[in-house]
Image (cartoon, rainbow, N blue to C red):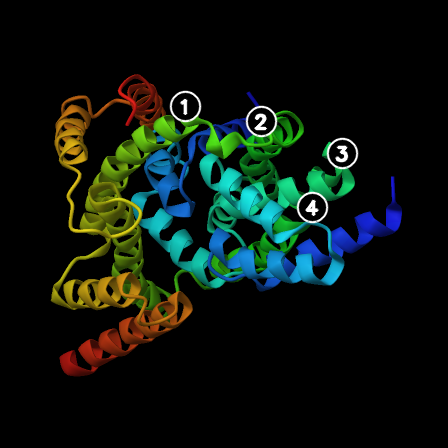
Amino acid sequence: MDISLLLTLMVEFFKTGLFALGGGLATIPFLFEMSSKYHWFTTEMLMNMIAVSESTPGPMGVNMATYVGIHTTDSVIGGIITTLSLVAPSIIVCVIVAQFLKKFKESEMVQNAFYGLRPAVCAMIASAGLGIFVTTLFGEEITMNINWVNVILLILLYFFAKKFNKLHPIVLVCICAVLGIIFQL
Amino acid sequence: MSEYIELFLVFARIGAFTFGGGYAMLPMLQKEVVEKKKWATDEEILDYYAVGQCTPGVIFVNTATFIGYSRKGILGGIIATLGVVFPSIVIISLIATLISNFSEIEMVQHALHGIRLAVCVLIFNATFKLFKTGVKDLFGILLFIFSLLATYLSLLPTIVIVVVSAALGIAFQLYNTRKEV
């Protein structure tokens, strides 16, 4: 295997992990940059990798790193190396931050900061939920045509989840995947 | 069972069934980490999420590192993260080497549409639960509405909202203590 290619991949994905703030979508511009700098893959291939990463489980950024690694080196080892390079900065930074937080957890300043952060984070989660909700109701391109089938299914699903609230989220995901295939949603 | 193995397995399980980005992992985290293992409280999950937003990289990975670290130190953080990425590596390896047009397969599309309904309901319930933990007074409600508008309409970058809300929290509590004195 080409060692210098592996090293370049390591550096590029470490950089991506370090500078991509805000999750999977933030890694996409870095991948476009790689494609124009090294010609590892065409834009079309990249679009395909993004589509696959979105339709498979797991964090999108991690999925894309694995895919790019395998694609450029033609081996699974490349995928493992790019993925580990992507998450290495996260681990290092988070461990440092966690140590800092442990030390100052009781401090009033940190407590007060979290007092403000919690409602904001709730809102960010709600916003993500709202985004998925709107896509489910109106489709990918926002049109005024409400997808009534989805509305009814959502209401049914909501009460189903409420009634069986001990149900594991994984089970609900699996049931819905099967229903999607059966009813050709 | 050693807690390291448990950390790995729990996060691998969550990683294998999380569709649609970091937020979709929340319902699983609540079920596995808060309810079943009692490794963290709802409140702590919110705090990890908040910090995970301002630290670089994938939010899911950051949250896993925090929880792993809180249980078993640095090695715990590393192992939890390896758990998160393990299913991705396996699944993407299989798809990349075997099926080149995976996302275009009709059955996959139908399954994903079904899953999106599940994720919708799951995130709604998760948000509702976290809202009760995180939003406790009028200050919280106002900050929630402000952040929801700012995020949903993409008025401000996430990092700005995080910094502003932390600063507002500090300022508001400071104002409260001053008033009492």
Same chain for the residues under marks 1 and 3 in the image = no
Q: Where is mark 4, residue-wise?
A: A82
Q: Estimate the spatial distance between the alpha carbons at disc 2 and disc 4, rounded to whole Å.
A: 24 Å
Asked whether residue B35 is in view, the answer is: no
Lateral position of residue B133 relative to residue A61, left or right: left
Q: Which mark is residue A125?
A: none
| Element under disc 4 | helix
Q: Estimate the spatial distance between the alpha carbons at disc 4 and disc 1, rounded to whole Å.
A: 30 Å
Q: Nearer the viewer, residue B139 or A112?
A: B139
Lateral position of residue A118 relative to residue A14, left or right: left
Q: Where is mark 1, residue-wise?
A: B107
Q: Where is mark 3, residue-wise?
A: A75
Q: Quadrant of the N terminus of chain A?
A: top right
Amino acid type, residue under disc 2 in the picture: Ile
Residue B122: x and y in percent read 27, 36
Task: Characterize the local packing of mark 4: few (<14), some (14-19) or many (20 or more) Cα atoms within 10 angstroms.
Answer: many
Can you tell which of label 3 and label 4 is closer to the viewer? 3
Say which residue appears at 17% left-offset and 33% top-offset. A154
* A146 relative to B99, above or below: below
Lateral position of residue A170 relative to residue A185, left or right: right
Q: Estimate the spatial distance between the alpha carbons at disc 1 and disc 3, rounded to whole Å.
A: 27 Å
Quarter of the view holding residue B134: bottom left
Quarter of the view holding residue B4: top right
Q: Which mark is residue B5?
A: 2
